Amino acid sequence: MGGFFGTVSQKECVADLFYGTDYNSHLGTRRGGLAAYDSQNKNFTRSIHNLENAYFRSKFEPGLSRFAGATSGIGVISDTDAQPLVLHSHLGRFAIVTVAKVNNIEELVRQLLNENCHFAELSSGKINQTELVALLLIQGKTFREGIENVFRHIDGSCSMLLLTEDGIIAARDEWGRTPIVLGKKEGAWAATSETTAFPNLDFETVRDLGPGEIVRLRADGVEVIRPASNHQQICSFLWVYYGFPTSTYEARNVEDMRYENGRLMAEEDNEANDVDCVCGIPDSGVGMALGYAAGLKKPYRRTISKYTPTWPRSFTPSNQEMRSLVAKMKLIPNRDMLRGKKVLFCDDSIVRGTQLRDNVGVLFEDGAKEVHMRIACPPLIYGCPFIGFTSSKSDMELITRRVIQELEGDAHKNLERYADVSTPEYERMTELIRQRLGLTSLKFNKMETLVKAIGLPKCRLCTHCFDGTGCCGLKEETKE
Ligand code: SF4
């Protein structure tokens, strides 16, 4: 997905920019970048590093003195392209970072090349989608017009921060799928994907930007350039998986939601009465498991732990084989606590299921008597066209689709029935997944329980990957 942070201050802002961006590190794994503006010398400075095998801080700290004197800046942790880009345009000089997924990239590139535009940046040999966004943006006569042009043309989603010579422009994606939250402290304002960036930098959360809203932040305040629209589809997976526990979007805290999600799910679980304990798969399964344990009135036990000192979450090799190995090496079962125990585990989701299957095998080998699995969300049946939450090239990588293929002879057949918890198809799919993973029992969360735990009306949430719907149960064709 990716995350960003921007701040503008009456004083030098480099430390806030550095740590604020770093606090978005869990949202991306590929590139990190900073751009800052020194208003006295009227100078933009930019730096980009590969984060595939190192922490953001270790890569950027040695070169931080280059940014000295800057009073505004933007930073990004990107899951896709190298950013920020710095442009000299008819709108003035500006730097841009995006959290985006552009599905119609080839069509837009063709269109722009036909209009005699060119692409300068190469991102792993591909078109840099932030550059594509920048080219669409500078077609407008104003920043507002340019951003609206981006919203109009992009199939997918795009939130962005622009560092200009007159403050920072923050624009939240047209449907509000990814968050941008504003914060302030004396003499400074900030915009971030994750509010986790705020407390230690002394920023107070002020408000979330609304869907499609555009604002300009200056050190002394916020100017609304484009008001929010009234249709919202914030990603429900932010609470389930992406978000850091201390973050809050739309006034709903991530850890609090996870706890409540587990507690509500446990209250409906009549197959777990004789488990010995509950354990979360680190990291995103832990909050849910604490709630589950409370709901079941069973002890929470860390029968599996993550070895964090040398395995940062951001270390995710692009090669699937290496990824599986790293995933396995990071999690360490506690044999002394597993032996002879019936354990109920909580995890955020099942995508391909390969890693989970291996983990389950290890848990049994290490002496667990029963391994029950509870998943924080409904089965993932549709790929994500909006933020790219998996690196899956095709929906067929989802375990649900492989099982549907097996059951129906066609991976695209009756998907609506497989997404409906009340159907025999749903039962059959869940049972087959349980068997494939070697679990004692398996339950996915119900959509109603997930929505209740988040606490927003369903029509304000994107639940597309679970039920294929866009807005209020309509297919996603309401977009212009
Ligand atoms: S499809 Fe799923 S992961 Fe993608 S934005 Fe919607 S809820 Fe989030």
Image (cartoon, grey):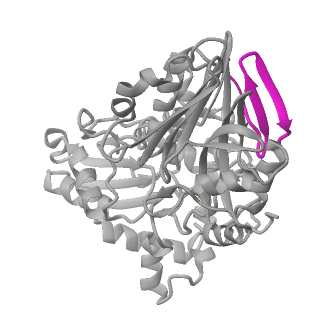
Residue 62 inside the magenta-drawn segment: no
Image position, residue 159 (x, y; %)? 66, 46
Secondary structure, magenta segment, majority class: strand
> Where is 474 relative to 231, above or below?
below
Q: Residue at x 77, y 48 (%)?
A: 147
Q: Is residue 295 visible?
A: no
Residues in magenta, as a range:
205-229
Q: Is residue 405 above or below residue 284?
A: below
| Residue 83 appearing in the image | yes
Residue at 77% across, 40% down: 210
Q: Residue at x 29, y 56 (%)?
A: 323
Residue 241 in percent (x, y) is at 49, 46
Work out whether residue 54 or residue 184 is closer to the camera in this orientation and state it: 54
Q: Quadrant of residue 260?
A: top right
Query: Could you say which is closer to the camera, residue 36 or residue 361?
Result: 36
* 459 on left or right of 74: right
Q: Compared to 109, does 55 lie above or below? A: above
- Split into quadrants, the picture shows ligand 1 in the one at bottom right
Left or right: residue 379 compared with residue 227: left
The one of 306 and 12 positioned closer to us in this rendering: 12
Q: Nearer the viewer, residue 127 or 462?
A: 127
| Quadrant location of the C terminus in the rendered image | bottom right
Residue located 67% across and 9% down the image: 186
How many numbered marks, from 0 up? 0
Residue 245 image offset from top left, x and y in percent: 49, 33
Q: Is residue 207 magenta?
A: yes
Residue 289, horizontal then vertical, whole percent: 41, 40
Quarter location, residue 86:
top right
